[in-house]
Amino acid sequence: MKPRLRTWLLRLLAALVLLPVLVIAAGQLGAFGGTTPTDLGVKNGRLKAPSATPNSVTSQAALWPDHPQAARAAIEPLRYRGDGPAALRTLAGILRGMERTTVVTERPGYLYAQARTRLLRFTDDVEFSLDEATGVIHVRSASRIGHGDRGVNRARVEAIRSAFMASPAGLPAGAGAAR
């Protein structure tokens, strides 16, 4: 092999090995965490609308019927039995037990958590709003950056739902609230 070709191939190989290492290191240092949104929370009884890109889910998607992602973002709320504030406290405990998830805000009727991916530390915002009149806890989970999420937000909410349903406070989706 000619020395020039060998040098070029070695440089290419070094770049192919080094690039993933640099990307992972950047992620571990927080380069892909995004900025915490300033418009989260409950406003007029609603959580924030779905993201404009296909990387969020919300149980309140029907409130934005003309939103381009409303149908794709739709997910069932969490149904609970008994005391609503106690159900929200149960949910907060479930979130605290999840890897790479931090409860940021816990106040009457509202929970906000941040979930990070393992390798690149992408941050997703996860919100819950208690609706005692209907016996549900509304949910919204959205990626901060990127276009798609490969179903991560939906899978996260369904994992939370499974853990919540296994608790004394949880009811299966579609079941009426037990009072």
Image (tube, rainbow, N blue to C red):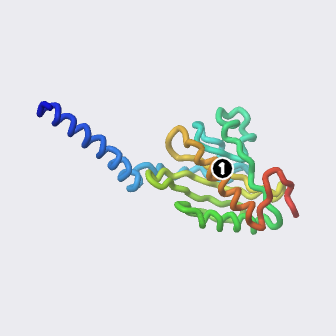
Closer to the camera, 102 or 65? 102
Q: Secondary structure at mark 1?
A: strand
Please indicate whether residue 131 sits to the left or right of residue 159 in the image: right
Pinpoint residue 39: horizontal percent, then vertical percent. Answer: 59, 49
Closer to the camera, 48 or 115? 115
Pinpoint residue 63: horizontal percent, then vertical percent. Answer: 74, 41
Which corner quadrant holds the C terminus?
bottom right
| Numbered disc total | 1
Please indicate whether residue 148 sits to the left or right of residue 78 in the image: left
Pinpoint residue 68: horizontal percent, then vertical percent. Answer: 65, 32
Q: Residues within 10 Å of mark 1 (few under 14, many from 20)?
A: many
Please indicate whether residue 33 sits to the left or right of residue 170 in the image: left
Give the residue type at disc 1. Answer: Arg
Quadrant housing residue 163: bottom right
Which residue does the image show at 60% across and 66% down from the upper left?
96
Check the image and report above or below for 53 versus 75. above
Which residue does the image show at 26% across and 40% down from the upper left?
13
Which residue does the image show at 36% across and 51% down from the upper left?
26
Please indicate whether residue 9 sits to the left or right of residue 111 in the image: left
Which corner quadrant holds the N terminus?
top left
Residue pushed farthest front? 1
Quadrant housing residue 50: top right
Pinpoint residue 152: horizontal percent, then vertical percent. Answer: 58, 47
Check the image and report above or below for 56 versus 114. above
Residue pushed farthest left? 3
Query: On the image, numbered disc 1 is attached to which residue?
Result: 140
Quadrant housing residue 129: bottom right
Which residue does the image show at 55% across and 57% down from the upper left?
114
